[in-house]
Image (spheres, rainbow, N blue to C red):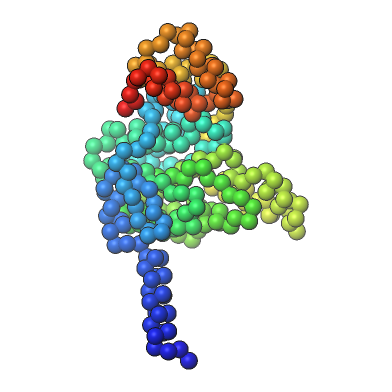
Amino acid sequence: MMSDSNTQALLERIAEALDRLAPPPHAASSLDAADAFVWQAENRSLLPVQTVARVEIGLLRGVDRVRDILLDNTNRFAQGLPANNALLWGSRGMGKSSLVKAAHAEVNRERGDVKDRIALIEIHREDIESLPALLRIIEESGRRCIVFCDDLSFDSGDATYKSLKAVLEGGIEGRPENVLFYATSNRRHLMPRDMIENERATAINPGEAVEEKVSLSDRFGLWLGFHSCSQDVFLEMIDGYAKALGLSVPPEELRRDALEWATTRGSRSGRVAWQFIQDLAGRLGHRLK
């Protein structure tokens, strides 16, 4: 039989566990504090981000088609019209997460009142299981929000994808009307190829086993692909950054140095272009704002 002290300790542990499960009472109202937040899963709260690390949408080169699609989708969502969850997948460094942040800023540019602006909420990959708690907070607030997960993927044995799958489409509650989910990934189906092949090899019904996992990406109405850029597009990125930042360098010298930089990195991408521009600005004594 439990002693009084043991009973008290057990009750305290249960109370602490319930406190962790319940969102703090100020969580919903805190959505008015900023236009961007980071979800703190451990205490079910939202950390306001006053200055988002982003680039202007006009500086994103080589992604014109997907830029226009995502911008249109985000605009429709902000206006209360039907819009789709979006999966931005493909080559590293080609501006997937930059485009999400830039589209969010662009849509909010003409919206003065906070109640008309959409909020961008970043959720970390390891916190996906807490997504239902976040959605309850957003639904209660009434503010239109984009929940954004950067570099989303699942490895063998990871079952947390089921939480996301239910939230996106399949759950009994469904996705709240005032929420969109945007994710970036290097994998089109959010899992490595060997994981898919292993499912086929070991399952009693290989087709059903693979379908269970691959169908997660089907929950995204938009699949926007990002691919490695050509030399011409890379140089267009360099030229655009240099002009926007007021870096005065002879065109031939800029082209030569940029291509040499890309060769030493072994790739051409928006990220590599920006890294070169940062190095160039530093050498010129130019401060980036």
Residue 96: image location, x then y, percent? 48, 34
Q: Position of residue 263 (x, y in %)?
A: 58, 20
Residue shown at 40%/11% (left/top)? 249
Of residue 244 and residue 69, the one placed in the foreground of this image is 244
Q: Residue at x 45, y 58 (%)?
A: 130
Q: Quadrant of the C terminus?
A: top left
Q: Is residue 146 visible?
A: yes
Q: Is residue 45 left or right of residue 174?
A: left
Q: Residue at x 76, y 52 (%)?
A: 201
* Left or right of residue 224: residue 206: right
Horizontally, residue 277 falls left or right of residue 264, namely: left
Rendered residue at 32%/43% (across/down): 49
Give how far across and how far down residue 156 sits, in percent.
64, 52
Q: Is residue 81 visible?
A: no
Note whether 1 is above or below 122 in the view shown.
below
Q: Which percent across, then down, holds residue 271?
A: 49, 29
Quarter residue 246 falls in: top left
User: Is 287 or 270 nearer to us in this picture?
Assistant: 287
Question: Quick check: 199 above or below 259?
Answer: below
Which residue ends up furthest to the left in the rendered image?
113
Q: How many marks?
A: 0
In the foreground, 257 or 195: 257
